[in-house]
Amino acid sequence: MWLLDKMLRKLIRRGELTIIDHRGKAWRYGAPDPAIASVTARLADSRVAMKIASDPRVGAGEAYMDGRFTLEQGDIRDLILLARYNSPFEKIGALKGKSPVAKAAGAIAGRLDQVNWKTRSRRNAEHTYNLTRRLYELFLDEDRQYTCAYYRDPANGLEQAQLDKKAHIASKLNLKPGMRVLDIGCGWGGLALYLHRHYDVDVLGVALASDQIEFARERAAEEGVADRVKFELMDYRDVPGTFDRITNVGLIEHLGTPHYPGFFAKCRELLAPNGIMLSHCCGRMTGPGLTDKWTRKYIFPGGYIPALSEIVGEAEKHRLIVSDVETLRYHYAFTLEEWYRRTVAARDEIIAMYDERFYRMWQFYLAGAEGAFRYGGMSNFQVQFMKDRRAAPIIRDYMFEEEQRLRGLEQPPKWHLEAAE
């Protein structure tokens, strides 16, 4: 316990944390702070403290998943937010004390994990997205938008915020009827269907998770637009032809930095001379880094959240004009908070589908992500790219005007579980 005690005394200054060790002794840290909840945690055995202190994210995550690290006051979200609140822009834990060899080994492992050749990319996508459909129904909005929503007002519901996200993206595309649109990493098809519905465009959505593509095709068929909105189980590297517009939402995080040159080269090849591409992705506000080991192992194998410099620098090398950049600083924290709330509300059903360990893993993932986006160095970027500077009006008024128009066209559906209450 001595090493964990040493770490927590340095880390927890604001807010109260109590750790009860396996002998029943209470160790207290910090001071009361009305801005953050107090937390009490219990360690089941003597090995948990060392496991957490030596590798905090993996150690705490796996101990929590295994039921050896439990919460008696507050829950895992409260604990993670407390830790992040005290260490907003630093990597939490004992990394600073690791030897240069250990740090180098960790960096190499993180880089190697980002080498996503085609077969590995498909395997990684299936690991992340081919979980049961019902799981995603339980915590996502009705349109299954598994990316950061756009909260025009933090008090808005998730359905409204996700609908506003689609309008926000669409407004930056300067779309015209009859255009061809490519949606790389199309998810369950919601954005592709939205763009066709409001602009009469033809859309090709591609992704690597078979269940996503199957579900998206079902949706297109139900709406009677399968001839105009098509979905293919395809790697973006294999897409032929040219497109007037390209969207990729939550896609860049799955590429890995070794593949950025090929991605931007392919997108330039696919984009028509007057084309526009809009990328929406998670991003680092503190420069390039590495994906933590727990997330690589359990949630997003092969994934990496980029710094803006990594995206923009590579686009410039491929003669793509970076024509507009927006940083969404808090929106994903609000999104993840609601996903976590819905996950907790569906606890019994998720455990019945999987088991207690999976449920705890999902909790830890969502809470950890919220902490990073609420108090840490993560945000979301929306970056508009052009091949020709004349592809859109020279002032941003067209975006604001179009977004306002779109907001008047649809009302968000009422969340199914709320409607059942």
Image (tube, helix red, strand yellow):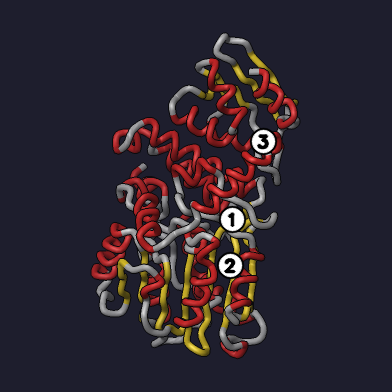
Residue 157 visible from this viewpoint: no
Q: In this image, 37 relative to 240: left or right?
A: right
Q: What residue sits right under mark 3 in the picture? A: 98
Residue 123: which quarter of the image? bottom left
Q: Residues within 10 Å of mark 1 (few under 14, many from 20)?
A: many
Task: Inspect the image, locate mark 1, and give the three-letter code of the amino acid beneath it.
Answer: His
Residue 90 visible from this viewpoint: yes
Query: x and y percent of residue 15 in the render?
Result: 70, 30
Quarter in which the C terminus is drawn: top left
Q: Earlier in the sequence, mark 3 or mark 2?
A: 3
Q: What residue sits right under mark 2 in the picture? A: 382
Q: Nearer the viewer, residue 82 or 298?
A: 298
Q: Nearer the viewer, residue 320 or 173?
A: 320
Q: What residue sits right under mark 1 in the picture? A: 331
Q: Residues within 10 Å of mark 3 (few under 14, many from 20)?
A: few
For mark 2, give the secondary structure. strand
Q: Earlier in the sequence, mark 3 or mark 1?
A: 3
Q: Are marks 2 and 1 in contact (CB under 8 Å)?
A: no
Q: In this image, 51 relative to 329: left or right?
A: left
Q: CA distance from mark 3 to mark 1?
A: 34 Å
Query: x and y percent of residue 211 in the render?
Result: 29, 57
Task: Please name the residue shown 46% across and 50% down the image.
Answer: 300
Quarter in which the N terminus is drawn: top right
The answer to whether 409 is drawn above or below residue 395 in the figure is above
